[in-house]
Amino acid sequence: MTAFHLPGEIFGLELGQKHRFSAEAISASSILIPKRSAILALAGRDGDVARQLWTLTADALQRVQDHMLVLGCMNAKERVATFLLQMAKRTSGDNELELPMSRQDIADYLGLTIETVSRTITQLENDAAIRLPTSRRIVLRNRAALGRLNA
């Protein structure tokens, strides 16, 4: 698994003739698949569209680079804390988030086992960094503590 895409996000922009990745929906989804030639033609005519495409591409590259750092340089607790902070930032931006994905999906994304993800979430709850009203709803109680883990 390479990424979680949230409602309204654009993904799948690739240079080659064939797509190298697939997508799997974890909730009800509507997906628009425009022709590459139409996107390129529009970007060629409209500088604002070209800038928006560049921004989307740069944002995607930044997320991939950040994910490489998570996988290569962080322990389990740091990975889970970083993931929670990133998801909060990408969703509502506040301290409460509803995760649409399973713990197994999170584990696959973070390069961990499901047991390690579950144990780490419990540790973060015991440390009072998060609160778990339900298995998928997480309240970030201490962003500073989480932030120190991903520094």
Image: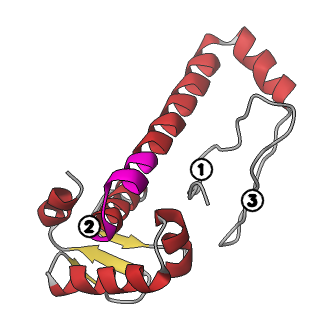
Tag of residue 88: none
Q: Residue at x 44, y 82 (%)?
A: 136
Task: Identify the element where label 1 is drawn.
Answer: loop
Residue 59 vertical position relative to residue 79 in the rendered view, above or below: above
- For disc 3, the marked residue is 30
Tally of numbered discs: 3
Mark 2 or mark 1: which comes first in sequence? 1
Prevailing SS of the magenta stretch: helix
**Within-10-Å neighbours for mark 2: few <14, some 14–19, many 20+:** some
Q: Quadrant of the N terminus?
A: bottom right
Q: Mark 3 is on which residue type?
A: Ser
Q: Nearer the viewer, residue 88 or 92?
A: 88
Tag of residue 8: 1
Q: Residue at x 31, y 58 (%)?
A: 74
Which region shows up in magenta? 67-77
Task: Identify the element where label 2 is drawn.
Answer: loop
Task: Say whether residue 102 is visible.
Answer: no
